Image: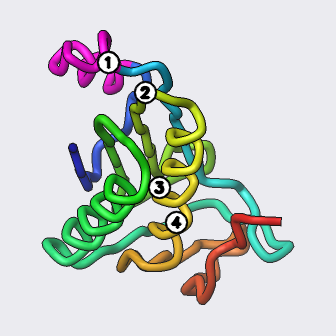
């Protein structure tokens, strides 16, 4: 399991390739991998957003993410999981979060990936401050619902 929170840009496919290379046992054992990549939109609540500052509580945020992934690993037959999360200054189209899971079977991989992402959005201690196109700023009070 890898949980990483950083201000660095996330190169999704390079990071996943490197992780799988460092964990060759995954190649032989997994029948499914599911990857979710979340990006910043240039709008929220019907207003244009030019930038976002994403903040977290170091140590606490990582612990929350580890607990979420552990719950997923206890519930579904996962071989491994990776969560990469950006903090700091983020622009539209930047990748904010990557959740990847590996499992022998696709049903477990799909369900676990969605669970991790939804729990992350509703439980993990991250705070978003948006800058609107007119220069005004606001704190995001609630996350966009992930299910329909």
The kind of secondary structure element at disc 4 is strand
Residue 15 percent across, percent down from the top left: 31, 26
Q: Which residue is rendered at x = 45% and y = 67% of the image? A: 120
Which region of the structure is painted magenta? 14-29
Q: Mark 3 highlights which residue?
A: 90
Q: Residue at x 59, y 83 (%)?
A: 140
Marks 3 and 1 sit apart, C-alpha to C-alpha, by 36 Å
Identify whether 123 is placed above or below 13: below
Q: Secondary structure at mark 1?
A: helix
Q: Which circle's residue, 2 or 3, is located before the other in the chain?
A: 3
Q: Main secondary structure of the magenta part?
A: helix
Query: Could you tell me which quadrant the N terminus lies in?
Result: top left
Of labels 2 and 3, the one closer to you: 2
- Tell which tag, 4 or 1, sits nearer the viewer: 1
Label 2 element class = loop
> Do the residues under discs 2 and 1 have CB atoms within 8 angstroms?
yes
The front one of 54 and 101 is 101
Residue 104 tag number: 2
Mark nearest the camera among 2 and 4 is 2
Q: CA distance from mark 4 to mark 1?
A: 39 Å
Is 18 magenta? The answer is: yes
Q: Nearer the viewer, mark 3 or mark 1?
A: 1
Q: What residue is drawn where x is 23% and y is 78%?
A: 57
Label whose residue precedes the other's in the sequence (3 or 1):
1
- The disc, 2 or 1, on the residue closer to the chain's N-terminal end is 1
* Mark 3 element type: strand
The first of marks 4 and 3 along the sequence is 4
Sooner in the amino-acid sequence: mark 4 or mark 1: 1
To which residue does mark 4 refer?
52
Q: Are marks 4 and 3 in contact (CB under 8 Å)?
A: yes
- Mark 4 Cα within 10 Å, few/some/many (few <14, many 20+)? many
């Amino acid at each position: 399991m890898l949980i990483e929170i950083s201000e660095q840009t996330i190169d999704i496919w390079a990071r996943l390739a490197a992780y799988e290379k460092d964990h060759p046992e995954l190649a032989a054992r997994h029948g499914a991998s599911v990857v979710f990549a979340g990006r910043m939109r240039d709008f929220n609540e019907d207003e244009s957003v030019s930038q976002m500052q994403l903040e977290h509580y170091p140590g606490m945020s990582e612990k929350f993410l580890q607990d979420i992934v552990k719950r997923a690993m206890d519930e579904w037959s996962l071989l491994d999981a990776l969560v990469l999360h950006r903090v700091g200054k983020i622009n539209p189209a930047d990748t904010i979060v990557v959740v990847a899971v590996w499992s022998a079977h696709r049903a477990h991989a799909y369900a676990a990936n969605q669970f991790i992402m939804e729990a992350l959005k509703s439980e993990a201690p991250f705070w978003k401050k948006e800058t609107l196109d007119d220069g005004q700023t606001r704190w995001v009070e609630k996350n966009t619902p992930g299910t329909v």
